[in-house]
Amino acid sequence: MSENGTTSTIRRSSSRAGTRRRKPKKNQIPIGILVLIFIAVVGVLLGLKTNNTLLFWMTGILFGFILQKARFCFTASMRDPYLTGSTSITRAVLIAFAVTTIGFTAIKYGYFKNGLPIPGMGYVVPISFATVIGAFLFGIGMVIAGGCASGTLMRVGEGFWMQLLSLVFFVVGSLWGAHDFGWWKLNVISKGKAIFLPDVFGWLGAVIIQLLIILFLYIAAVKYEKAKANN
């Protein structure tokens, strides 16, 4: 037999042996049924107490399911363009921003038109040097951790136990931040200026400007991915 024929036979034999050594996949249907029963039982117990808790439970379950299936992660939206050249998640985040811009503006404008207090105004906070520091630290942290808060929670649920360490320090950092927030607010955050775009450009103008910025970033992401693919 020729050398090539011998090599081919060895490769086929190795491939067959590797196939035989593979462990059969476990049937996860019983586990899925048990999880559904657990979700239903907990939902019923929560529903007997307060309706809001049941709503939060079901919303969290659905959000986690969608998040896991979509692989949606803010870290990946910023990281993938540099590492892989892919901007698919980046564009998904931009689309989410566009949809929420329209939805939240509609809600806020409805309250404003009826002379009611606009919801969420407590989150319109001054832009200051603390914003820059926070963005820088969060950017470093989420890259080292391999995910943002949503991505970390998703991977903990998938069984990636190393992400549990990230989750622990998410909690530690949040508690530390809450402890020192008073000092930051008094000495740094309050020195900045709060900007609410409808106060500057009007409600329609604010929506148009924000959507145009999102559209520009979306087009830039598409062009960036095509340029990376051609290199």
Image (cartoon, grey):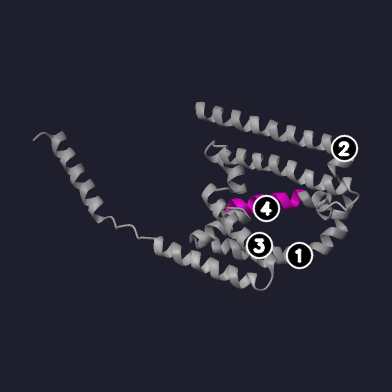
Outermost residue, left side: 1
Q: Nearer the viewer, mark 3 or mark 2?
A: 3
Q: Which mark is residue 55?
A: 3
For the image, the number of numbered tags is: 4
Q: CA distance from mark 4 to mark 2?
A: 32 Å
Q: Are marks 3 and 2 in contact (CB under 8 Å)?
A: no
Identified at 85% across, 55% down, the residue is: 188
What is the secondary structure assignment of the residue under circle 4?
Answer: helix
Question: At 78% from the left edge and 33% from the top edge, which residue is drawn?
Answer: 208
Give the alpha-carbon distance from disc 3 to disc 4, as whole Å: 30 Å
Magenta stretch holds residue 116: no
Nearer the N terminus, badge 2 or badge 1?
Answer: 1
Q: Earlier in the sequence, mark 3 or mark 2?
A: 3
Q: Circle 1 is placed at which residue position?
A: 178
Percent x, y of residue 63 = 60, 55
Residue 179 is at least partly visible in this image: yes
- What residue is shown at x 86% (from left), y 41% (from top)? 198
Question: Which corner quadrant of the image does residue 106 belong to?
Answer: top right
* Residue segment shown in magenta: 132-144
Q: Amino acid at mark 1?
A: Ala
